[in-house]
């Protein structure tokens, strides 16, 4: 099982032209961050929006794109947890009031969301979704109605939010980007003479051929309109908490996050593994595609040949849960098929980015053994994941995480590897080039950069029943 980020966001402004195509291709570039739903909202005197379930290229037909026009807009791709994959939770969200129209796209997780929602419901606010993003939107609108000043309204809301949030907003004819004070989720900015674009990853600017300008700073609000660009550093913290898993797995390897090239981090992780490893093997091979840079770094460090042994079927999407074991095994081989001539009789080092529940690693090792592998030495690009993420990443419960209740030797036996080595936390810090006061390591240590309310993990159905 892979773990999933909840979404990717794009915002675009142009002095001269329609931005719909920029947002569409930006979302297409970020499709790896969410495949459940997608949406685009644009301002052209009023906000027009189109959103729905499915992938960007599937939902946004030529007709849908042609129905949207505007020089300012935002877009969203979403991954949702089981049971929450429905149109009501697709973004952007649109709030219309006589004094302001606001559309929002959000990446992150507000851990005091239930408390904030309950406060709004006590004063009569109704909701159409079950997401924290809609709560943020209503809070900003209510503040703006009172003050008439968007910067102070956002600041007042930021003072109440606990958790992770990168936002792009349409507030009437303004495009606004907001990043939480700890910078947990990424948010980048690109610009040229006539265009400004915000996106979850810098690779969007490469695709759109717009120069990468830098990151939105933690705690910063950036406002773009025909009057120009305003930057307000609303909240400053004595630390940051960039998500370490962006560097390990989520972000595309060709992205630059917080000034750090993602590919270089992954390659260095493999190098660190290789420099301390002396296992006797014929070659190193990755679980495609995310583990490729790890395996290449390891190969260079050890002078061990790099081989591809698992071929991914790139036309297979998410498989549903199959009822019989034989069917489940066929589904795994449909996605990853071993090259028997490469594997048979060989001792190999197998790299993956992480081990979550251990089920995927177990199946892959079984496939390679059945293909004739003599020895399989598992190497992992991430330290053991011992606690679920509470700041915007979908993970199994703590009990389902294989490293939460087993030591490394027990995990090795469970997945069926001949040897197993993880990256150490200190080595992870070295590879990324940031200290513990600059990263969120909560899923590795159980210690989070924000205080997590006890009720945060209650199912929403329980909360709504008791409201």
Image (spheres, grey):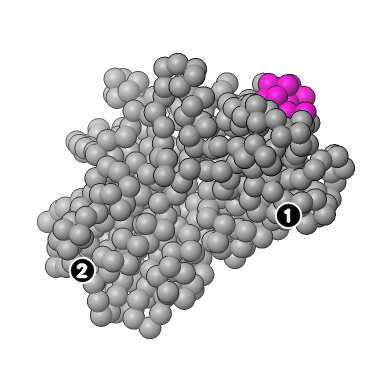
In the rendered image, residue 408, in percent from the top left (x then y), is placed at: 75, 27
SS of the residue under disc 2: loop
Side of 381 where 226 appears, left or right: left
Of callouts 1 and 2, which one flags the residue occurring earlier in the amino acid sequence? 2
Farthest residue, direction front: 341
SS of the residue under disc 1: helix
Q: Crowding at label 1, few (<14), some or many (≥20) Cα neighbours within 10 Å?
A: many
In the rendered image, residue 422, in percent from the top left (x then y), is placed at: 73, 38
Residue 339 in which image quadrant: top right
Write down the residue under mark 2.
70
Q: Quick check: is 235 in the magenta stretch?
A: no
Q: Residue at left 21%, top 55%?
A: 61
Q: Give the range drawn in magenta.
A: 407-418
Farthest residue, direction bottom: 193
Q: Which of marks 1 and 2 is in front?
A: 1
Q: How far apart are marks 1 and 2 (CA)?
A: 45 Å
- For the C terminus, give its image quadrant: top left
Residue 313: which numbered mark, if any?
none
Q: Residue at left 33%, top 32%?
A: 84
Above or below, 402 against 392 in this view is above
In the rendered image, residue 265, in percent from the top left (x then y), is placed at: 67, 56
Residue 282 or residue 233, whichever sits in front: 282
Residue 360 in which image quadrant: top right
Farthest residue, direction left: 98
Write down the residue under mark 1.
297
Please identify the dominant SS of the magenta region: helix
Side of 201 where 125 appears, left or right: left
Above or below, 166 against 418 in this view is below
């Amino acid at each position: 099982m892979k773990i999933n980020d909840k979404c990717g966001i794009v915002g675009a402004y142009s002095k001269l032209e329609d931005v719909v195509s920029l947002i569409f291709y930006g979302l297409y570039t970020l499709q790896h961050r969410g495949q459940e739903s997608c949406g685009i909202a644009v301002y052209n005197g009023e906000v027009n929006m189109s959103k729905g379930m499915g992938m960007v290229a599937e939902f946004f037909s030529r007709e849908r794109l042609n129905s949207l026009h505007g020089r300012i807009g935002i877009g969203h791709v979403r991954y949702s947890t089981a049971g929450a994959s429905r149109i009501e939770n697709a973004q952007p969200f649109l709030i219309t009031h006589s004094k302001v129209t606001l559309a929002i796209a959000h990446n992150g997780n507000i851990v005091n969301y239930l408390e904030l929602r309950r406060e709004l419901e006590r004063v009569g606010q109704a909701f159409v979704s079950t997401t924290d993003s809609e709560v943020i939107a209503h809070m900003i609108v209510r503040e703006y109605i009172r003050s008439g000043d968007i910067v102070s309204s956002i600041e007042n809301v930021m003072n109440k939010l606990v958790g992770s949030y990168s936002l792009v907003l349409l507030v009437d004819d303004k495009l606004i980007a907001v990043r939480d004070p700890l910078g947990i989720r990424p948010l980048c900015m690109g610009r040229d003479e006539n265009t400004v674009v915000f996106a979850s990853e810098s690779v969007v600017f490469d695709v759109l051929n717009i120069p990468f300008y830098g990151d939105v700073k933690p705690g910063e609000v950036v406002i773009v309109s025909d009057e120009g660009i305003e930057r307000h550093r609303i909240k400053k913290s004595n630390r940051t908490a960039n998500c370490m898993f962006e560097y390990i797995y989520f972000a595309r390897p060709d992205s630059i996050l917080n000034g750090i090239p993602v590919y270089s981090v992954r390659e260095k992780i493999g190098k660190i593994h290789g420099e301390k490893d002396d296992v006797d093997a014929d070659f190193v091979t990755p679980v495609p595609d995310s583990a490729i840079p790890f395996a290449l770094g390891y190969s260079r460090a050890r002078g061990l040949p790099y081989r591809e042994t698992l071929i991914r079927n790139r036309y297979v999407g998410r498989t549903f849960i199959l009822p019989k074991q034989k069917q489940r095994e066929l589904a795994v081989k449909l996605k990853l098929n071993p090259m028997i001539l490469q594997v048979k009789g060989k001792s190999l080092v197998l790299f993956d980015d992480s081990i979550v529940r251990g089920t995927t690693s177990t199946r892959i090792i079984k496939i390679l053994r059945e293909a004739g592998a003599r020895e399989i030495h598992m190497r992992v690009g991430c330290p053991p994941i011992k606690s679920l993420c509470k700041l915007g990443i979908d993970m199994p419960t703590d009990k389902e995480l294989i490293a939460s209740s087993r030591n490394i030797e027990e995990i090795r036996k469970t997945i069926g590897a001949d040897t197993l080595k993880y990256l150490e936390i200190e080595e992870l810090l070295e590879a990324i080039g940031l200290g513990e006061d600059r990263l969120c390591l909560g899923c590795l240590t159980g210690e989070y950069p924000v205080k997590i309310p006890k009720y945060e993990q209650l199912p929403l159905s329980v909360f709504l029943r008791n409201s």
